[in-house]
Image (cartoon, rainbow, N blue to C red):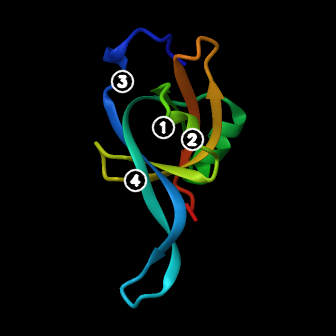
Amino acid sequence: MAEFRGAGLFIQKVAFDKREDVEDPYGNMVAGWVEQFQDRAHFEFLHGSESVMAARLQSHEPMLVRIRTSANAKRIDTDWQMRDLRGDNKPYNVRDVTWDNSRAVVDLLVEGGVATG
């Protein structure tokens, strides 16, 4: 992952969603995604390893996403999803959450092209 160098690195805009029960148009409670917060992020697309190449062959898109530490970032878990707001609002499953040694940033392993439910 790129070394933390300040705010200029965080040019992508993302939203983080958590699965919760929501009311459908008929008044029934159903599972759905509820946005928790938006943030700026840095994307780093993975390449090279055998597992990454296998995922790409299956049309999965693994990548590392870095965001700054915040009270909201501390809530992210692997049952959440991330959406790319600068692109086409595409959802990515959060696969892993790793705190940087400096505790200034959070690294997220996310994967697109898979079911987010």
Name which residue type carries label 1: Asn
Task: Say which residue label 3 marks.
Answer: 10
Give the label on residue 72, or none.
1
Q: What is the quadrant of residue 58 in the picture?
A: bottom right
- Residue 47 position in % (x across, y down): 57, 30
Tell me where residue 34 appears, x and y as whole percent: 44, 60
Between the C-alphas of marks 2 and 4, the distance is 21 Å
C-alpha gap between disc 2 and disc 3: 20 Å
Amino acid tagged 3: Phe
Q: Position of residue 86 (x, y in %)?
A: 28, 42
Closer to the camera in the image, 106 or 11: 106
Amino acid type, callout 4 = Lys
Please report the residue visible at 39 percent of the width from the left and 91 percent of the height from the top.
26
Find residue 78 and report its horizontal and vertical position in percent.
64, 47
Is label 4 in contact with label 1 (beta carbons under 8 Å)? no
Q: Residue at x 45, y 54 (%)?
A: 91
